[in-house]
Amino acid sequence: MLKKINYTKLLLTVFIFSFCNTVSAQGTIKDYQRAELFNGLFQNKIYYSPNNIKWLKDKKHFFYSMLTEKGIEFILVNGVDLSKKPAFDQEKLAVILSELSKTKLAAFKLPISNVSMNNNATNLQFNYDDKLWSYDLTTFKFEEVKLAENQRQNAYWGDRPTNVSDRKTKSPDGKWEAYIKNYNVYIKSLAASNSEIQLSFDGSEGDYYSSSIYWSPDSKKLATNKTRPNKPHLIYLIESSPLTQLQPILQSRNYLKPGDALPQLQPSLFLIDSKKQIPIDQSKIQSQYALDNIAWRKDSRAFTFHYNQRGHQKFSLVEVNTNGVLKELIVEESKTFITYSSKMFRHDVNDGEEIIWASERDGWNHLYLYDGNGKMKNQITKGEWVMRSVIDVNEKDKTIIFEGSGMEKDQDPYFIQYYKINFNGTGLVKLTTENGNHKAYFSDDKSVFIDTYSTIEQPQITVLRDGKTGKVLKKLENGNIDALLATGWKLPEIFSAKGRDGKTDIWGMIIRPSNFDPTKKYPVIEYIYAGPHDSFVPKSFVNDSRGSLHELAELGFIVVQCDGMGTSNRSKAFHDVAWKNLKDGGFPDRMAWIKEAAKKYNYMDITKVGIFGNSAGGQSSLGALLFHPDFYKVAVSSSGCHDNRMDKMWWNEQWMGYPIGPEYAESSNVDNAYKLQGKLLLILGELDDNVDPSSTMQVINQLVKSNKNFDFLMVPGMKHSLGGDYGEHKRRDFFVKHLLGVDPPEWTWKTNITVAKP
C-alpha cells in the first residue's frame, strides 16, 4: 500500500533544507532568518516522550501525557496487570469544550494545560481559558474550580518570616492553646474561661518569642525560639516606565547581603504541668546562619533541630531533652563549605533509634547510619561516585532507594541511575543501568516504577520496571524525533576531555549549525553558568536548552557548554575549587576542554572565542575577559552578580565564606574592571530583584573611570533575565559583528520573515 503523502509537510521540509544547504557567508540575513524560523520549528516535534507522570494510588495506575503525531494523548498504565489504554475519552471532552467555547476543537489539540487526574481516575483538573476546571469522567459534569486566594503568592523570595503574629496553636490533646502576647509565651485552657497563664517573662520588642510554637505529642511540653531580630537591608529599584502612571515608581526589597546581621534564635522549653521554663545551654549554637526544623520525638522525650553555623563550615543535628540538656547528636564540619542547600539529608528511623545522614566527609556525597546517641554504626553507600538524592527509606525492610551518579564507570558521571541498598551497606541492587539520564516515578508501595531515560543524543525511552529488581516489565514508549530532524536541526554531540590536572574528565556538549560545512572555519561561543550549587549541561534529551543555543549556532558559530571544576555533583575536591574563588569559574578546565575539541575538529576557530551567561553566568562571562583575555575575546554578560559582596547572602556566603575576606575583592569584576580587554556587552533589567542592579552599574562606573570601551543595554521593566527578545537580538548582533567581522543586517529583516507552518 502506498503511504499517503502530506504535501504541506513535504514542501516545508524542502523549504527548510533549501535554507540548510545554502553555502553562504556566516551572519547573513538568511542565517538570521533561519535562526528565527527554527525558533518555531523546534517546538512540538518530540513524540512519544511521556511527561507529567503520576501514580494514582487508589486506582493503582500510572497517568501520563505525551505528544504524538495526532497531538497530546493521555494514557493510563495498570501497575498490576501492565495494560495500557487511553486515560479518558478525549473526543467526548472535545465536544463539551467546543460547546463551551463555541469553537470547533480537535480531540488531540485541546487548549488545556496542567492536566491532572485524581487518585481513583474519576476526575480531571486542568487550566482552560485562564481558569481552573474540574471534569467528572463518570457524569461528564464540567465546572469551574474556585480557588482561595494565596496570601503568599506575591511574597518576595528574600523576605524572612518574622514569626510575630497572633497565631494560636492548639495542643494535641485539645486542652490547651498556646500563643504570643506582649512578646511572651502564654497558654490558655480551652475548658475554662479566664485561664490565661504566662509562661515567659523576658520577651521584648527587640528580643521576642516566636509564634511558631511546637507542642510535644503528649501535650505536656512546648518549644519555641526566642528571637533577636536583625535589621533589614533594603535595595531600591526604579520602575521607569510603569503601566499604571506616567511618573516612575520607587520599589524596595528586603535583600540580605554577605556580612549583614542575621536573626539569632534561642531554643526555649516550657513544662505545662509546672508552668516553668527550663533553661537551655546556648553555648554550642552561637553565630547562627540558621536554626530550624524543630521536631519533637514521638514519645515526647526530646525535641531536635538543625544548627547551621554562620560560614557553613559546621552543620549539626541537635537534641534537647525535657531537662533542657542540649546534645549534638551529629556534627558535620568542613574546612571549606558544607553544601547545606542541596546535599543535606536526614531520616530518623523508629523515632530516632537510628539516624540516616548524608555527608561528604570521605570526599564523595554518601549516606551513613548512626545510632540514636549519635554514634556512627556504618557507612551505607561508598565509592568514587555521588549519592544524589534519597527516594525512599523502608524502615520495615531496612532498605533505601536512592539516586546516584558516577557508579557506572563507562557512562557520563552525571547520569542519574536508581539503586536500592540495605541500611548496613550490603545488598546493592541496580534498579537501572542503561546508558542515559534516568528519572523514576514510583508507585506508593515502591513495587513498580516508570523509568524514563535519554541522552542529549538519544530521545527518551519509557519503561515500566519491577521496584525490587529493576526488571523491565513492559516497554511503554520510544521517543521519536524524526519530525525534529526533518527541520534540519542537528543533534548536539556529547564531548569529554581532560581538565586542568590532565586527569579529571570534563563533560559538555557541542552544537553545530544546520548548514554545517566542515571545510569552513567557525568561531566558538561558550554558554556559561558555573554556579557551585549544581551542574548545568543538559543530560536528558531536549530540543534546545536555555540560551537558545541552536538558534545562535545558525548564525555561523559552534556553540559549546561544559561543567568545569567548582560545580557540583562530582567529588568534594572537584567542588572545592570554588571555595573563596568564584572568579575561577572552572576556566582552566573550560579552556582545556575547548582546545581539545579544536584538536579533534579543526573547523573550530579558537582564535575567536566568545562567551555569554546570565546571573552567576553573567559574572563569569565578564570574568572571562578580565582574567583570561588571551583566550576569550568577546563577552555578553546579562544580570551579572559582578561582586559577591553585592549579591544575596545565602548563595555567596556558602561559597565565598564568612566573615568577608580579601577573596571577595579578588573575585570582584568591579575591582578588576580596569583589566578589561576584548569586546563587552552588558545587559541589565532595571527591576532585577534577584541580583541587585547596582552590581552592574558599579562595573560600569569602574569601566568609565578606566576609560574602557564597552556596550550597555538597560531594559525598562525587565527583571532577572538574559535580556528578553530584544536582548537576544542584541547579543546575536554583537557576536556576529565581533567574532565573524560582519556588520549585522538591518533589523527590518525580522518584520519581513514568513514562518512556514505544516
Image: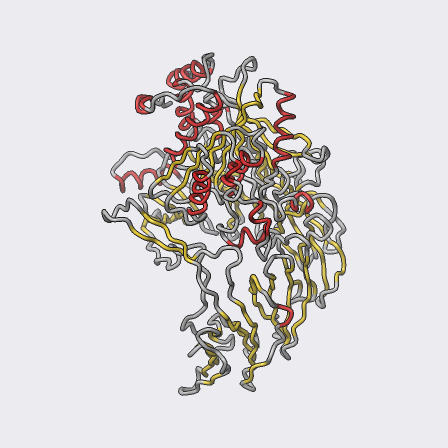
Position in image of residue 290 (x %, y %) = 56, 62
Q: Is residue 485 above or below residue 190?
A: above
Left or right: where 54 falls relative to 432: left
* Quadrant into which the C terminus falls: top left
Viewer-proximal residue among 693 and 307: 693
Q: Is residue 276 above or below residue 90?
A: below
Residue at point 71%, 53% (across, down): 361
Viewer-proximal residue among 286 and 393: 286
Query: Within the image, what quadrant is residue 19 found in?
Result: top left
Specify how the rendered protein is coloured.
Answer: secondary structure
Left or right: where 635 falls relative to 748: right
Is residue 418 visible to us here? no
Position in image of residue 388 (x %, y %) = 63, 47
Left or right: where 331 falls relative to 95: right
Position in image of residue 424 (x %, y %) = 75, 55
Residue at point 54%, 69% (across, down): 265
Query: Within the image, what quadrant is residue 454 found in?
Result: top right
Q: Residue furthest left?
A: 246
Is residue 620 visible to us here? yes
